[in-house]
Amino acid sequence: MPEDWLAPATASKIQGMSQSNDSTLTAPTASSRSATETLRASRRAWFGLLVVLGPVLLVSMDGSVLFLTMPTITHALAPSAEQALWILDIYGFAVGSLLIAFGNLGDRYGRLKLLMIGTVVFGIGSAGAAFSPSPELLIAFRALMGLGGATLLPSGLAVLSELFENPRQRAQAIGIFAATFATGFAVGPILGGLLLSRFDWGSVFLINLPVVAIFLLAAPFVLREVRATRTGKVDLLSIILSAGGLLLSVYAVKELAAHGPSVVVFVTGVVGVGVLAWFVARQRGLEHPLVDVTLFRERVFTVAIVTGVLSLFAWSAAAYLTGIYLQSVLGLPVLTAALLALPGAAVLTAACILTPAFADRIGRRAALVICHFTMAAGLALLLLTTVTGGIGWFIASTAIAGIGYGISFALVADTAVGAVPMTRAGSAGAIAETSNEIGNALGIALLGSTAALIFRLAGPDIAPTLDETLDTGATGAVITQAKGAFLVGLHVAMGIAAVLCAGLGVLALRWIPKR
């Protein structure tokens, strides 16, 4: 925005006037009053930041809060293997596929208005999910939560940017926004485990309602409406193609893992891929595309976006599968499993906060390479876990991989935006925001389905999942075989994720210039 370029000079003048008045002890002037008003506006802005951070934290936490909760939900609702995966990742798909669309709608019809509506929808979805009596209803309400969540991230960031006229303060606020989002992903499983140690599984959704209520009461008083002049219109067909193609493709993968190959699986998968190809082709021909796919011609941008997808792809799958490993294989209580995840969450959060200064010293290229190889090393440590022990390897894995996850969360958006011309920075930022949510959903869908397929092939063939097998009352050799089959699936999934992360590290070395 043009005022961004004027703000530093204005702030400097105000500061200078304030210092002059202090030194001469003169009566307050118009300049000193202006400085006071600016200070008051800043206090209001910081309070507005606190209000916005509540929904942001909820959106990110709800992408991961079920990772330690799923064994309990499986016992309560008895979902099939396919339904369990949908419960986990329908939320991420809804958020990821609609994020850019709602960003465009907010520009036209008002960010604050969309933020308020989205928060209400998110709250309704949370309440419905908490009291769902069946897997089908839980999936539906999780999708509704994703619909609301898709409005919160782009609208919250735009409203936040308008609160801070000082560019330095705005940068600090956006950094806090990003760190909060990353922290939410990290603490989601831990919060779920802590709640389950005292309350029913529905509490992981009911915890959202107080935050929703506080936001709805406070937002009208501390936030301003934001609109942007944007040409063109939202292409409804593009939204349908992107969401439909993703869902059809993922459905085919889940069906393949749950029931094996079939004509339906093959046709669904081909149609899903075809719809996604149609979506990409359509974007190339639109004057105002939903996703500017031509940005991917820039190699640095491509590496940044793939990093955003892959980091959440690996992290979400690892968090989900190790949650089952700790509880169902090693037999740990959910509270113990949650506490074991604390070191990794602390490392991830610290890495996210410290990375900007770290990257300024060693360069973004080096930071991204470290990101990829630490993720690969951490994931590879999970290959050393066994049916009888592996807590130490789990803690070491989350701590080492947490360094890479934190670097990714902190650098992806800035690297993506910096790799393209300023005139296309908005499109680059929107794609970067979407990459994390899509990666979160794809990790559960693809790696989770891979682990499920291996369990179906190597397990005792009593039930399609480990938890369902344990619930049958099986004993002795059957339980040993079931736990061993799950562990093989975990190892294969984490091995794939580690190879992908290491491969992207090699690609970053070759594609990202040293300067």
Image: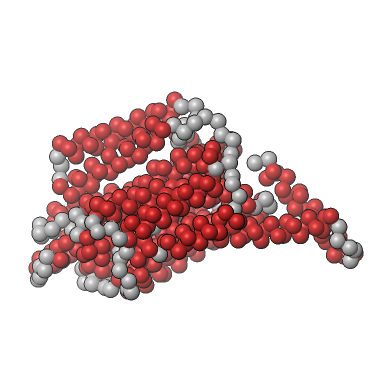
Relative to 474, residue 251 above or below: above
- Quadrant assignment, res 283: top left
Relative to 220, residue 328 above or below: below
Q: The N terminus lies in which quarter of the figure?
A: top right
Q: Position of residue 316 (x, y in %)?
A: 35, 56
Q: Name the foreground residue: 414 vs 368.
A: 414
Q: Quick check: can you spot residue 238?
A: yes
Q: Position of residue 215 (x, y in %)?
A: 51, 58
Residue drawn at x 22%, y 51% is 82
Q: Name the foreground residue: 151 vs 253.
A: 151
Residue drawn at x 78%, y 55% is 34
The answer to whether residue 199 is left or right of residue 457 is right
Residue drawn at x 26%, y 65% is 72
Q: Position of residue 99 (x, y in %)?
A: 44, 44
Tell which residue pokes out farthest to the top in this image.
285
Q: Position of residue 187 (x, y in %)?
A: 42, 64
Q: The C terminus lies in which quarter of the figure?
A: top right
The answer to whether residue 330 is left or right of residue 376 is left
Q: Quick check: can you spot residue 504?
A: no
Q: By what rule are the colours in the image chosen?
A: secondary structure
Q: How many marks?
A: 0
Residue drawn at x 15%, y 45% is 260
